[in-house]
Amino acid sequence: MEPTSAEKNCTNRTVNELLLQEVIVKAINQILTERDFFLKTLQQNIAKAVVNADTLSPDGIQARLEELQKELIKKANNKQDYDAIADEIFRLRDQKEQSELDSHHREEAMNRIKELQDFISEQKTDITEFDEALVKKLIEKISVFADHFTVEFKSGLVIDIEA
C-alpha cells in the first residue's frame, strides 16, 4: 500500500512515552530545585492577575444598569427619545457578561497558581518517578521540538527541557 501524501510529508517527531515521562519529571524537579525563584514568579503572576482585574466589576455594571433602566422608564413616560440609553443598556449587559467571564477565568488561573505553589511548598525532595495524577493536576501541555521539549504548567509557568 502506497503512503498518502500526508504520510510522506509528515515531519512530526515520534516520542516514546517513557521519554515524555522523563521530561515531565525533569521539568517538575527543575521547579523544585529552583523553588524560591519559581515561588516568586508565581507570586508575581498572582499580582498581575489582580492588577489586570477589571476596574468595573459585574456588581458595578449592574448598579449602572439599574440607574439607566430608571432613566429609560422616565424618558419613555415623558415620551422622550431613549434610544441612546437603550443602546448603553445593551452595551453594558454585554460588558457585564464579559466581566463575569473574565472574573471566572481569573479565579481559575489563581486556583491553578495556588495549586502549584502548594505543591512546591509541600514537596521537600525531588520526585523520583512519574505520577500521572500529579501530571493531570499540574501540566497543561507538552510541546515537542527537534532539540527540546516545552512543558507548560496550568499555572502559566513554562519549562524547556533539552532533548
Image (cartoon, rainbow, N blue to C red):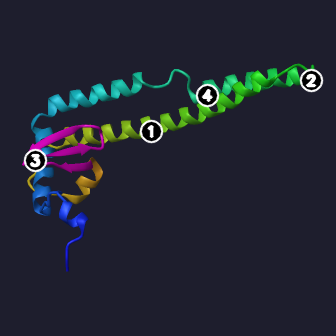
For label 4, the SS is: helix
Region in magenta? 140-163
Image spot of residue 134 (x, y percent): 23, 53
What residue type is disc 1 on?
His
Q: Which residue is mark 3?
A: 26
Neighbourhood count class around disc 2 (C-alpha, 10 Å): few under 14, some 14–19, many 20 upward: few
Q: Which residue is mark 1?
A: 105
Gap between marks 3 and 2 measured at Cα? 70 Å
Gap between marks 2 and 4 measured at Cα? 27 Å
Q: Earlier in the sequence, mark 2 or mark 4?
A: 4
Gap between marks 2 and 1 measured at Cα? 41 Å
Q: Earlier in the sequence, mark 1 or mark 3?
A: 3
Whether residue 32 sits left or right of residue 111 in the image: it is left
Tally of numbered tags:
4
Residue furthest to the right in view is 78
Q: Which residue is mark 2?
A: 77
Which of the 4 image quadrants contains residue 12?
bottom left
For label 3, the SS is: helix
Tell me the mark number nearer the camera, choosing from 2 and 4: 2
Q: Earlier in the sequence, mark 4 or mark 3?
A: 3
Neighbourhood count class around disc 1 (C-alpha, 10 Å): few under 14, some 14–19, many 20 upward: few
What residue type is disc 3 on?
Lys
Q: Which residue is mark 4?
A: 59
